[in-house]
Structures are given as structure tokens and as C-alpha cells.
Image: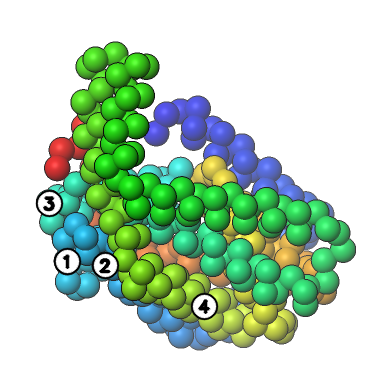
């Protein structure tokens, strides 16, 4: 990663951590962490991996215009990608996921990256649905959060409309790309740009099929409902209770916040908003902090450990992150 990107993410994470933990007695937070009933983490981890399997199923639908890959072969690729997101900043795991897919299944990286971007748009829309569903029941003292949600909704819906438009008229987009590159780019950049654009549009092929779009959307809802169930299981390890709608709101807000640049593992951008949402529901701040930190660890550690195992089985090392970026820049079909 470029050093300036790392420091930007680290600064944002530090700001969120300061906001989350300011004024807290960390010894009290540690006491709540030590006294939690960690048996509840077992079903929470099981439910989380059900959500990861659902993510694999969703990606299968998106990749079918490129190549149909059995879920058993696709699952390790997804896990390696999410491990990369947890270890490297700026969601570098998404590039790694496409790199592993190219290496294992000979699928163009630029095409598979298009499916990953569309995944993120669907995820954002479902997160906003969760927030909208929970907001009427949330004790939020200001309209500022609603304004942020409305702006984010416009951005995500706008992105989805653009992707649908590109997928609907691929030849016209190629003509436009050719016209723009001929007028504004040096000759040596024109053909690589056109090749990338063509492969990227192939990756949007799933959006041309209504059944695929419906399945992608429904699977996205299932994924995030399962993840909220994980939040619910972990809640039972601590001495507080909030409604499932409150956990949906927390899930939606923290995952929208983690789209911001941050240090690896979404440090701070996950924790600060999560603690803030729980305190709105009158959860004591020390318990809210202990719960959020344990939840974050329970989300981070299992898939990171399994991803490292799959990565070793692939015969890959950490240097493959850099190799993935290089291949993405010069990807060939």
C-alpha cells in the first residue's frame, strides 16, 4: 500500500477510537469483557460462516455469465478475500479475491472485480434498508443521521442505476470509451483502457438477467440478517438486552462506517459507531464498549484464521498482495 494511504486510514481509525473510548474507565470495560459468557460465541461463529456461505452463493450468481464455479471451490476464494480485507487497509482483499479466482479458475480480474463492486453496492443498499427499517423505532435525538442516510441512499441507488445502464448497452459504452480515449488519452493507453472496459462490462453480465438480480438482492438480505443474528448471539454473552431492530440499526451503521478508509481490520470505524448506537438505547457505555470490542474480534478472528489456512494451501504468501495489484493493472482475459 502507498504509505500516505496507510497513514490516512490510521488517522481516521485513531479519531474514531478516541471518540469511542473517550472518558471511559478502561478497567471497567476490561471487567465486563472478562465476565462475559463466551459460550455464546460458538453459535455466533457458526451463524457467521453461514453468512459467508451465502456470500459465496451470491457471488456464484454474479460470476455465472463468466464461468460457473462449484460453491465448494469458490468458498475458499471468498474467505481469502475477506481475510485480506481484515489485514490490509482500503479493502485490498477484494483485489486479492479476484487474483486468487484468476489463478484458480482463469477468470479475468477486471471482470470479477466488476462483480465485487456490484456486491458492495447491493450490500450498501441492504444496510440502508436496515437503517430505514430501524430508524422509526430508534431514540435518535437529531435529524442529522437521517440526512446522512438519505445522502448515502441517493449515492448507492445512483451507482446501481449507472451499473444497470452500462450492463444494458455494452456496445454503446464501448463506442463512448473509444471516442473518449481517442480524444483525451495518449495512444499507448487507449487499447489497455478499451480492453479493461470490455472485460469490466462482461463482469456486469449478471445485471442483464432479472432472476439473477433478484437472487443477488435476496441473498444480500439473507447475508445481513444472518450477520445480525450473530450480533444477537454475542449480545447474550453480556448483561444487556436490546431489540433485534436495534441490532439491525447497529449493523447497518457500523458497516456503512467501515466503507471509510481506516487501519486494517476496520479499527475504530467499526467500534465507534457501534458503541454510539448502543448508548442511544441506554446501554451503559462500558458494557456497550465491551460488547462492541468482543463482537469485532469475533467477526475478525475466525474468518482471518481460516483465510490464512486456505492461503497456505494455495501456496501463497503475503507478497501475493502486491502481485495481485500488479496483475490487476495489466490483466489479460
Mark 4–mark 1 CB contact (< 8 Å): no
Tally the marks: 4
Residue 315 in the image: state x and y as whole percent.
Answer: 14, 52
Disc 3 versus disc 4: distance between alpha carbons?
Answer: 33 Å
Q: Specify the quadrant of the image occupied by residue 61.
A: bottom left
**256 relative to 120 in the view: left or right:** right
Residue marked by disc 4: 225
The way the protein has been coloured in the rendering is rainbow
Q: Nearer the viewer, residue 157 or 58?
A: 157
Q: Specify the quadrant of the image occupied by residue 65.
A: bottom left
Looking at the rendered structure, the secondary structure element under dot 1 is loop
Mark 4 crowdedness (10 Å alpha carbons): few <14, some 14-19, many ≥20: some
**41 relative to 60 in the view: left or right:** right
Mark 2–mark 4 CB contact (< 8 Å): no
The tag on residue 60 is 2
Mark 2–mark 1 CB contact (< 8 Å): yes
First of labels 2, 4 by sequence position: 2
The residue most toward the top is 186
Looking at the rendered structure, the secondary structure element under dot 2 is helix
The tag on residue 68 is 1
The residue most toward the right is 141
Mark 3–mark 4 CB contact (< 8 Å): no
First of labels 2, 1 by sequence position: 2
Amino acid at each position: 500500500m502507498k504509505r500516505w494511504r496507510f497513514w490516512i486510514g490510521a488517522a481516521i481509525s485513531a479519531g474514531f477510537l478516541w471518540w469511542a473510548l473517550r472518558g471511559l474507565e478502561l478497567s471497567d470495560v476490561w471487567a465486563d469483557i472478562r465476565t462475559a459468557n463466551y459460550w455464546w460465541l460458538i453459535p455466533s461463529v457458526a451463524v457467521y460462516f453461514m453468512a459467508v456461505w451465502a456470500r459465496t452463493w451470491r457471488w456464484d450468481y454474479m460470476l455465472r455469465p463468466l464461468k460457473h464455479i462449484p460453491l465448494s471451490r469458490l468458498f475458499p476464494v471468498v474467505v481469502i478475500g475477506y481475510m485480506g480485507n481484515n489485514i490490509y487497509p482500503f479493502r485490498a482483499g477484494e483485489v486479492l479475491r479476484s487474483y486468487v479466482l484468476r489463478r484458480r479458475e482463469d477468470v479475468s480480474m477486471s471482470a470479477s472485480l466488476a462483480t465485487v463492486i456490484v456486491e458492495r453496492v447491493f450490500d450498501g443498499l441492504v444496510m440502508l434498508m436496515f437503517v430505514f427499517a430501524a430508524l422509526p423505532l430508534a431514540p435518535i435525538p437529531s435529524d442529522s443521521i437521517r440526512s446522512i442516510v438519505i445522502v448515502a441512499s441517493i449515492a448507492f441507488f445512483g451507482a446501481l442505476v449507472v451499473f444497470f445502464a452500462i450492463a444494458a448497452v455494452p456496445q454503446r459504452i464501448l463506442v463512448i470509451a473509444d471516442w473518449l480515449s481517442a480524444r483525451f488519452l495518449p495512444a499507448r493507453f487507449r487499447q489497455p483502457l478499451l480492453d479493461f472496459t470490455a472485460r469490466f462490462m462482461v463482469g456486469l453480465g449478471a445485471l442483464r438477467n432479472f432472476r439473477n438480480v433478484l437472487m443477488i438482492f435476496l441473498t444480500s438480505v439473507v447475508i445481513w440478517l444472518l450477520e445480525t443474528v450473530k450480533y444477537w448471539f454475542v449480545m447474550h454473552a453480556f448483561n444487556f438486552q436490546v431489540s433485534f431492530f436495534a441490532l439491525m440499526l447497529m449493523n447497518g451503521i457500523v458497516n456503512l462506517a467501515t466503507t471509510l478508509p481506516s487501519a486494517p481490520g476496520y479499527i475504530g470505524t467499526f467500534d465507534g459507531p457501534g458503541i454510539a448506537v448502543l448508548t442511544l438505547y441506554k446501554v451503559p457505555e462500558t458494557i456497550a464498549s465491551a460488547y462492541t470490542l468482543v463482537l469485532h474480534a469475533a467477526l475478525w478472528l475466525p474468518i482471518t484464521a481460516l483465510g490464512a489456512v486456505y492461503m497456505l494451501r494455495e501456496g501463497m504468501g503475503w507478497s501475493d498482495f502486491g502481485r495481485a495489484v500488479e496483475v490487476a493493472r495489466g490483466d489479460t482475459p
